[in-house]
Image (tube, helix red, strand yellow):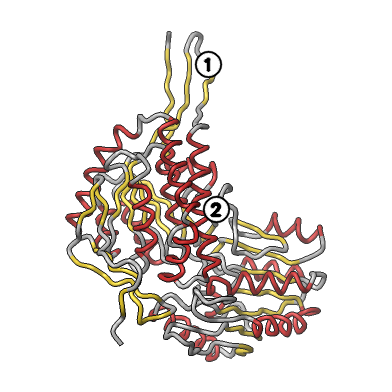
């Protein structure tokens, strides 16, 4: 069946220097819940058009870096206000193009609006330091200044929240932006650009270039006018970003993968532990870098925990993202579905027991539906416990006690988020101090964070300064120290 265009019928163009412009080619945006539906048709930039966007951003950066806190507040507040007012509409678009449930899509859009509102407030709190010099009569000032032109490259799994938490601080701190959303899900990125176009932001400060990473992304990485790159995506691509930017001495910030542990101790509240594990591992179709993909459970409650998780999985509704009462939508596309199925086969080949799920599902609309998979009897050395699957697949690892659980939790090349379920203040406190991860959760899913506090990890999960909250200033600004003899 030929996919049918539904909803938005006009070709969606790139946005450069305050104007909408066609690219060299176009791409259909397919609904993973219903592959017969085209969500929209989006133009694709080439390298020359990307260079044009960078050139205009370079010019605009000079004036925007001198803008007032009030100007920045007004722009950011306007963007946040429109996002919140349109959260139902844009949440539906998000769910149609990415496959999140409608509730998750609306929630993510609201979060994007809240992020812009937060950074509107931060724009009024721009501050520096005035210090006494060690030399008599000399005054010292330390201020933060805009980085310049920032390239922003975002992934498909959070197509409006992650762009928001990069674009909002970039604007807040006086930078100009060249934004490349994930090629797989351009709809939310375009919708966000459309809102920004009406916010009062001067022409050229924000530019949208949709297209392939090998074309648009590569131009952003290599262009000498781009002063910094903020990237979220795969580990392999992150390493390429790092090598390319370091080679020309450009600043870069990386958020990459995770293989996040959730420890469940004998003393855990079992209802909380089960819900924490299921929410963290499987909701958003497990397509979160913070997902709880390793469930590390002590011997005393292992069997009870597994039985109750399976019982909970049996209650979940997997269907079209827009269906009533659905808990889990489809996998984002055919390629990701193949990767999930490959890892399920790898787990079985390694000797893990597929205790539940991992099967293709048929629904009223043709889509990429997969039942949530739970492996038991696994070892931490297995590939399914070392490599990021990025789907609704989780493994249970049986351990003897807390000490072994902590050791297994930390035995990974990643270090984004880490969690524990326990009623012991002793173990909770020790875990928060000793988990080798950028974020630690107690009796909460490893996936799910606030928008006003720092986000990021250690080891192979992240590189550079933290994202979100006031800590975002570390990447989007440079520090200047000025001396004056009056």
- Quadrant, the N terminus: bottom left
Front-most of 303 and 123?
A: 123
The C terminus sits in image quarter: top left
Towards the viewer: 142 or 177 = 177
Residue at position x 33%, y 57% from top? Answer: 180
Tell me the SS state at disc 2.
Answer: loop
Q: Quadrant of residue 386?
A: bottom right
Residue nearest the observer in this picture, 421 or 479: 421
Question: What numbered label is drawn on residue 134?
Answer: 1
* Horizontal side of residue 440 vs 459, given as left or right: right
- For label 2, the crowd category at 10 Å Cα-Cα, with few meaning under 14, some 14 to 19 and many 20 or more, is many
Residue at 51% over, 48% down: 115
- In the picture of the structure, the residue carrying the numbered disc 2 is 455
Mark 1, secondary structure of its residue:
loop
List x then y, in percent, for residue 67. 37, 30
Q: Is residue 269 above or below residue 246?
A: below
The percent position of residue 383, horizontal first and vertical second, equals 52, 80
Residue 471 is situated, as x and y percent measured from the top left of the image, at: 53, 43
């Amino acid at each position: 069946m030929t996919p049918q265009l539904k909803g938005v019928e006009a070709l969606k163009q790139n946005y450069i220097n305050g104007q909408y412009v066609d690219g060299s080619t176009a791409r259909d945006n397919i609904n993973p819940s219903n592959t017969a539906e085209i969500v929209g048709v989006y133009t694709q930039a080439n390298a020359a058009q990307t260079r044009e966007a960078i050139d205009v951003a370079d010019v605009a950066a000079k004036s925007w870096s001198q803008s007032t806190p009030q100007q920045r507040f007004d722009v950011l507040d306007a963007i946040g206000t429109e996002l919140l007012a349109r959260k139902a509409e844009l949440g539906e678009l998000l769910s149609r193009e990415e496959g999140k449930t409608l509730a998750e899509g609306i929630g993510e859009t609201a979060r994007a609006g809240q992020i812009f509102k937060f950074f509107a407030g931060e724009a009024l709190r721009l501050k520096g330091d005035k210090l006494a010099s060690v030399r008599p009569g000399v005054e010292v000032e330390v201020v933060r200044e805009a980085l310049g032109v920032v390239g922003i490259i975002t992934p498909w799994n959070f197509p409006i929240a992650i762009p928001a938490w990069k674009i909002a601080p970039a604007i807040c701190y006086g930078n100009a932006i060249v934004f490349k959303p994930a090629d797989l899900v351009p709809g939310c990125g375009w919708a966000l650009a459309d809102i920004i176009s009406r916010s009062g932001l001067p022409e050229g400060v924000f530019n949208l270039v949709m297209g392939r990473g090998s074309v648009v992304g590569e131009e952003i990485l290599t262009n000498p006018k781009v002063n910094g790159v903020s990237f979220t995506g795969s580990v392999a691509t992150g390493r390429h970003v790092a090598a390319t930017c370091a080679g020309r001495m450009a600043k870069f910030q990386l958020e990459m993968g995770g293989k996040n542990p959730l420890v469940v101790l004998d003393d855990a509240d079992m209802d909380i532990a089960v819900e924490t594990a299921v929410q963290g591992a499987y909701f958003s179709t497990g397509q979160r870098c913070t997902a709880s993909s390793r469930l590390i459970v002590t011997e005393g409650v292992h069997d009870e925990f597994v039985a109750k998780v399976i019982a909970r999985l049996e209650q979940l509704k997997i269907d079209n993202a827009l269906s009533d009462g659905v808990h889990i939508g489809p996998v984002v596309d055919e390629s990701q579905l193949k990767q999930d199925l490959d890892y399920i086969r790898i787990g079985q080949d390694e000797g893990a027991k597929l205790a539940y799920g991992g099967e293709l599902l048929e629904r009223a609309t043709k889509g990429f539906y997969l039942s949530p998979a739970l492996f038991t009897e696994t070892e931490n050395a297995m590939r399914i416990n070392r490599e990021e699957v990025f789907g609704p697949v989780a493994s249970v690892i049986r351990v003897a006690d807390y000490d072994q659980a902590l050791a297994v939790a930390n035995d990974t090349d990643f270090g984004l988020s880490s969690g524990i379920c326990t009623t012991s203040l002793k173990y909770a406190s020790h875990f928060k101090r000793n988990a080798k991860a950028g974020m630690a959760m107690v009796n909460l899913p490893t996936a799910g964070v606030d928008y006003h506090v720092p986000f990021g990890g250690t080891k192979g999960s992240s590189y550079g300064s933290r994202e979100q909250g006031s800590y975002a200033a570390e990447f989007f600004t440079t520090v200047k120290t000025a001396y004056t003899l009056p």
